[in-house]
Image (cartoon, helix red, strand yellow):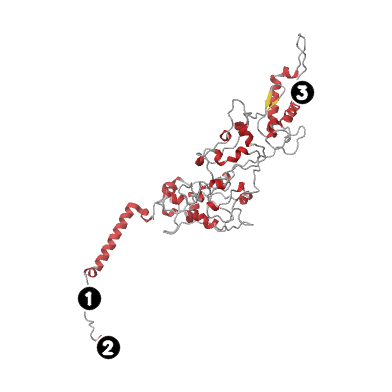
Amino acid sequence: MRSSKDLAKRLRFDRFPALDTFRRRFFVVGAVAALVGFGVWLGFTSLFGKRQYLPGPVSQNHATFGAQCENCHAIPFASVQDEACLHCHATRTHSPFVARDAACRDCHVEHRRVEVFLSVSSRTCVDCHGSLESKRPGGPAVQASITTFAAHPEFTPLRPGHHDEAAIRFNHKLHLTSDRMPPEQPRLVCASCHLPQSDGKLMQPIVFERHCRRCHPQQVPGPVGGIEAPHRDPAVIRDELIARLLVLGVDNAETIFQGTQGTLPGIRPRPPIDDSRSLREYQAKWVEKLESQLYAPFDERQPLLEHNKYCFLCHVQEGTRAPGELARVVKTNIPARWLVRGEFSHRRHDTLRCQVCHAASEGSERTSDVNLPPRQLCQNCHTEDATRSAGTACMLCHFYHDTSKDAALRACRRMELPLGLLIGNELPSAHGGPESAIASPAPCTPTPSELRSAD
């Protein structure tokens, strides 16, 4: 039996495999490849410069300084930090009570398609709002778990216990069905008063002079003819009445302060309309007469159509008014917008008739009624996984950072950028450079009302 040692003696170690062509030219091939790579890099650098390193095109919003990588990237090939974004964009906080705040780059991915940069997927929102954590005492002020629009809670103004708290009397049903309109006026419809703003989102505010005055002129009988009171504060109304009484007194002095003698047959004598001894007495007397009519208390026992047509037909009086006192009117507090945490555009829904979404308005007789479309109605078009869905993305209605609701807050956070920074003549990096290159935003401290409405 042969041992392993005897078998090993048969192996020949004095011969090696012959080198092939590649192995013989290994150094030359490596040198050529390096030179070709360097030549390609040199060509790309001369043609494209820093753009050769971009993983994709810069979004349209950043295209003006897309070649100045150092404006955003403090460290080459590293992720952009929030400080770089905030050198151009105003500071915007989602909520002062967030348990954890997302970085800008978590939602806005640069060097992709423009729509990817501007649009944020609902998945990003659900990461927090699927199980919301908040530092707010007592927990979050919004629903703590929302994963889809199908699971979205009812809109806040329509939830039990909520109602329109505006201090004004208004009856939609009466205005839409009244047969007492002046003959020259067509029957009222929704669009008679409710017109969208120029941007097509919210509705324009109701203004007395434009929407109400043609049917509800505040005209009271004066010493000669009628005097129309402006739709203003009681103090302004009094000043206006005094001025107009003075004009009437001057223009119609004989008619007001002198009587007529019955010297001719058939002419009965008439005493003076006003027997005041002074102009001050005349004005005080008539101001009280006019104001007592304008501010006649509202009597709920009296039919609405037969009630007096002056101030307290619509407005609510605070306390009672003694003779000579100015009336006190409760502030109306008519909401400028109902969905304070959401966005809505009437222009995008203008193919629908008003009654489709606001069907309850035609039968609404109380100011406390909230005539908004319920969530279930919205879900008829905004459905999950439907081929003809109008969309269910969170960003259709909600923005992560939005200062448009507070003009003062937006103004104090606005920054001014030098033109040279935008067109590339100046290169003040976001992480260094002259202090005058970028104006720092004015500090803004949230007010208590902002803190209450946040979260």
Q: Earlier in the sequence, mark 2 or mark 3?
A: 2
The amino acid type of the residue labelled 3 equals Ser
SS label for mark 1? loop
Visible residue check, residue 425: no
* Residue type for callout 2: Lys
Amino acid type, mark 1? Pro
For the residues bearing labels 1 and 3, Cβ distance under 8 angstroms: no
Nearer to us in this view, 24 or 426: 24
Q: Nearer the viewer, residue 449 or 172?
A: 172
How many residues crowd around disc 1 within 10 Å: few (fewer than 14), some, or many (20 or more)?
few
Disc 1 target residue? 17
Return the residue found at the far top. 265
Total numbered badges shown on the rendered structure: 3
Q: Which residue is mark 3?
A: 278
Up-down relation of residue 110 to residue 225 (above or below): below
Q: Quadrant of residue 299?
A: top right
Q: Which picture quadrant has residue 7? A: bottom left
Quadrant occupied by the N terminus: bottom left
Q: Nearer the viewer, mark 1 or mark 2?
A: 2
Label 2 CA crowd tier, 10 Å (few <14, some 14–19, many 20+): few
Q: Is residue 194 left or right of residue 268?
A: left
How far apart are labels 1 and 3 at the CA level?
Answer: 133 Å
The residue tagged 2 is 5
Instruction: Residue 90 in the image: state x and y as whole percent.
Output: 52, 49
Counting from the top left corner in percent of width and height, residue 85 is at 48, 53
Please give left or right for residue 176 compared with residue 224 in the image: left
Q: Residue at x 64, y 49 (%)?
A: 160
Task: Say what secondary structure mark 3 lies in.
Answer: loop
Identify the mark nearer the N-term, 1 or 3. Answer: 1
Residue 43 location, x and y as percent? 30, 55
Give the label, 2 or 3, closer to the camera: 2
Query: Where does the image place residue 22, in percent across and percent down from the top left?
Result: 23, 68
